[in-house]
Image (cartoon, rainbow, N blue to C red):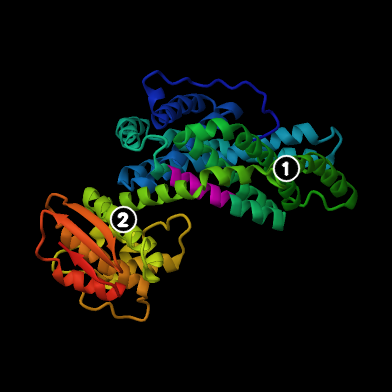
Amino acid sequence: MGPERGTAIAVVKPSARTRRTGLASWMEQVLACHATAARAPDVRAVHQLRKALRRCRTLAGALREADPAPEWRAMLKASRTLFRALGGLRDTHVLGQWLARLAPADDAAGSNLRYRLNQREVDLTAQARAALDAFDRAAWKRSIAPLAARAARHPPGVPLLEQLAMRRLLALHACHRRALRDDSSTAWHALRIAIKRLRYACENFLPDLHRRWGGDLDRLQELLGEVHDLDLLWAEFRGAHLLADAAPRRAWRQRLDAIRAPRLAAYRALMTGRDARWRAWQAELLAPDRVAAANRAALAHWGARHGSDPARAAWLAARFEQVLDALASGPAPPACAGARRPGVAAALLHGLAATGSKRPSRRQVARRLERLPLPIGWDEADRDACTRVLAGLGRRRLGGAGVTAEVGVAARLLDLLAALAPAGQPLPVLAIESTAGGLALRVTPAVTVAELYRRRLAAALGVPVSVS
């Protein structure tokens, strides 16, 4: 961060073509900033290159959650060494700036630390030059077009990317509570990183939110960035044993606190109390309907990557909810309410278990679902219920201590719906209605293999079920 925030820094403006894709723009910015830093790795050049690399790495990490292609891992690996090599040098530059601002001319501790930083800068500059020389510009340039094409498959504002921002907001809130409770430099630093990740997610994936939130997020990141700089400076003094005497130690603590305390107070003014920013952010981004849509999109996307037919999965999930809604209009069995969440999820993930005559065991399904990022609001019990529904599909018995009535209803209803819409066939038209104490389904075209599943569903529900 550093105290010289008003310093003008030349920014390479992307062309009209690269402006269309944020990732392509920042990847080209890396090449331009790399060329500048390779000539002279000074304060400005290192800062600009680190910023461009960080943007690329943040975008790649986020998009990798939605699209786990090996190209993202290759890009992250290609930039890791250079990004880390520049990190120490950037910290040294920032600490030198703060020291020049805060240290009196006759301060012995400040002079000694300045000498140590100068010596360290020489070594770190040599390491940075080696990393700059080793950076493969040609490979980076070749990867811009294919990675930009992959990023374009996930346009801003879609529910799948909204879930990424939701996760960032939940992580920010957890770090916020920890920082207020612990009041440690480590906790405040983790909070700054969480704010930065949310800001980048909104900026690149949710531009409407960024227009409203961006100013506050940028301000919060700036405040905590300066707090982190001051904490690093204090750690340098303590680590070098330069403040052994009480008088200089007290003087430096007072200097740092005179800057640090107002910034933390400004953070608390924005993020605590009845008008706390995070409350408004949660009310908007984590609205129940919005969370449900994002979870559904994420489950559908994950299911499609693991064998589900997207159209059939969407049909199964929609009809599953319609049946539960029809049952709710009458004397619905108590298990129906709890069957909705695992049943809809299992419908969207149907391909994990629908493997023809050879069905995976519950342990195999569980291993597959362990890689599924938990949807917003889920816990491990929800994942286990979804696992048991998927593992029970097509089976005569749903034995097991963890099989609840909700799991039984979800599995039997999904079995019947899957039988009415065979894989590889056109999706049928299904009319659903609640009858006097029961459920009636009319399917076009007619299906003759559903009788077994109809009887199993009727037994699980405890009400008559007819299919015509």
Q: Amino acid at mark 2?
A: Gln
Residue 167, how many percent across, how many down? 49, 50
Q: Amino acid at mark 1?
A: Leu
Nearest the viewer among 234 and 121 is 234
Is 87 on the left or on the right of 62, as rendered? right
Quadrant assignment, res 91 = top right
Residue 49, how many percent across, how many down? 51, 31
Q: Residue furthest front?
A: 436
Q: Secondary structure at mark 1?
A: helix
**Mark positioned earlier in the residue sequence (1 or 2):** 1
Nearest the viewer among 415 and 219 is 415
Residue 397, how many percent across, how many down? 24, 79
Q: Residue furthest right?
A: 247
Q: Around disc 1, counting alpha carbons within 10 Å, would you say few (fewer than 14), some (14 to 19), or many (20 or more)?
A: many
Q: Residue at x 44, y 36 (%)?
A: 205
Disc 1: which residue = 230
Report the magenta residues as a range: 162-172
Residue 65, how many percent across, how many down? 39, 48
Residue 131 in the image: above or below residue 238: above
Tell me the quadrant of the picture where the N terminus can be found: top right
Q: Around disc 2, counting alpha carbons within 10 Å, would you say few (fewer than 14), some (14 to 19), or many (20 or more)?
A: some
- Is residue 287 shown to the viewer in this render? yes
Q: Is residue 167 magenta?
A: yes
Q: Secondary structure at mark 2?
A: helix
Disc 2: which residue = 322
Alpha carbons under labels 1 and 2: distance apart: 58 Å
Q: Residue at x 84, y 32 (%)?
A: 105
Is 354 on the left or on the right of 28, as rendered? left
Is 437 on the left or on the right of 190, as rendered? left
The disc placed on residue 466 is none
Nearest the viewer among 249 and 292 is 292
